[in-house]
């Protein structure tokens, strides 16, 4: 892993800040009245695996804005077939994953992003939950952390499940709070260590969620 960069590519940083200050920041702070706690816990450079709960399609841009650096998330392969959009989301850090392809492709793509200086975002349960609480955490984030020897950064998104509840046709302007925990050291690659650290991440995120607004 000697070719690891300290930061994301400059063109991606530029696109991130452009999108952040023209779209995400105004919507987050004016529309969702976003509160951010613990930003001082975010490593400003180097590889890091950002782990969070997940309750809304709005979570990736809110999370990336809150930690103050681009965060690479996996996205469905179909989006990368759309002209212009494909180039834009690649620059913004997204990487394609085929539906039903399993964790191997996601692991390979995430490791490539980390090697190129990105923070990589993983939703700990792998899918949205109705209230934002984590009940069934997956080992993927811990596996990536162990493989790259990158710390895990637990982040809690509170209130995003109210933005677009089931049956709603349009987003609702509801208050959102993001709480960022302290980094957690990468686990050893054995299953017991992966399980222990995964459960620790879930515990920290759920405890942050319990703090509410």
Image (cartoon, rainbow, N blue to C red):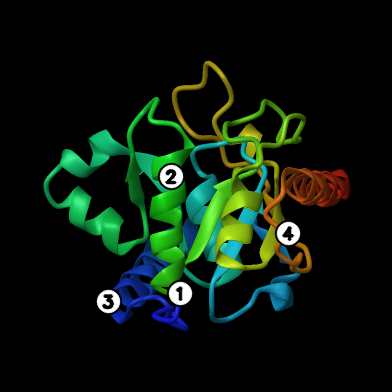
Residue reaching furthest to the front:
190
Judging by the rendered image, the residue that carries numbered circle 4 is 187
Contact (Cβ within 8 Å) of mark 1 with mark 4: no
Q: Residue at x 16, y 40 (%)?
A: 81
Q: Is residue 88 above or below residue 169?
A: below
Judging by the rendered image, the residue that carries numbered circle 1 is 1
Q: Is residue 28 visible?
A: no
Q: Image quarter for residue 199?
A: top right
Which quadrant would the N terminus be assigned to in this image? bottom left
For the residue carrying disc 2, how many other residues have a C-alpha within 10 Å: few (<14), some (14-19), or many (20+)?
many
Relative to 43, is 82 on the left or the right? left
Q: Position of residue 193 (x, y in %)?
A: 78, 51
Relative to 89, is 113 on the left or the right? right
Q: Nearer the viewer, mark 4 or mark 2?
A: 4
Relative to 134, is 48 on the left or the right? left
For the residue carrying disc 1, how many other residues have a C-alpha within 10 Å: few (<14), some (14-19), or many (20+)?
few
Name the element at disc 1: loop
Q: Earlier in the sequence, mark 3 or mark 4?
A: 3
Judging by the rendered image, the residue that carries numbered circle 2 is 106
Q: Nearer the viewer, mark 1 or mark 2?
A: 1
Q: Earlier in the sequence, mark 3 or mark 1?
A: 1
Q: Image quarter for residue 53?
A: top right
State how far apart marks 3 and 2 are (Cα).
Answer: 23 Å
For the residue carrying disc 4, how many other residues have a C-alpha within 10 Å: few (<14), some (14-19), or many (20+)?
many
Name the element at disc 3: helix
State how far apart marks 1 and 4 are (Cα).
Answer: 17 Å
Judging by the rendered image, the residue that carries numbered circle 3 is 11
């Amino acid at each position: 892993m000697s070719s690891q960069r300290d930061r994301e590519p400059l063109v991606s940083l530029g696109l991130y800040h452009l999108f952040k200050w023209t779209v995400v920041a105004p919507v987050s702070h004016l529309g969702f009245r976003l509160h951010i706690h613990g930003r001082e816990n975010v490593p400003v450079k180097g590889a890091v695996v950002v782990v969070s709960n997940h309750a809304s399609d709005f979570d990736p841009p809110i999370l990336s804005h809150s930690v103050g650096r681009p965060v690479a998330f996996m996205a469905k392969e179909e989006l990368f077939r759309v002209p212009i959009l494909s180039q834009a989301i690649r620059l913004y850090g997204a990487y394609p994953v085929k539906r039903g392809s399993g964790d191997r492709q996601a692991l390979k793509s995430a490791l490539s992003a980390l090697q190129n200086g990105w923070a990589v975002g993983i939703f700990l349960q792998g899918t949205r939950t109705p209230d934002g609480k984590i009940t069934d955490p997956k080992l993927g984030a811990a596996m990536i952390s162990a493989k790259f020897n990158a710390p895990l950064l637990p982040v809690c998104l509170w209130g995003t499940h109210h933005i677009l509840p089931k049956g709603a046709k349009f987003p609702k302007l509801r208050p959102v709070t993001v709480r960022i925990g302290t980094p957690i050291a990468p686990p050893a690659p054995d299953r017991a260590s992966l399980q222990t650290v995964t459960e620790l991440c879930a515990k920290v995120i759920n405890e942050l969620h319990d703090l509410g607004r």
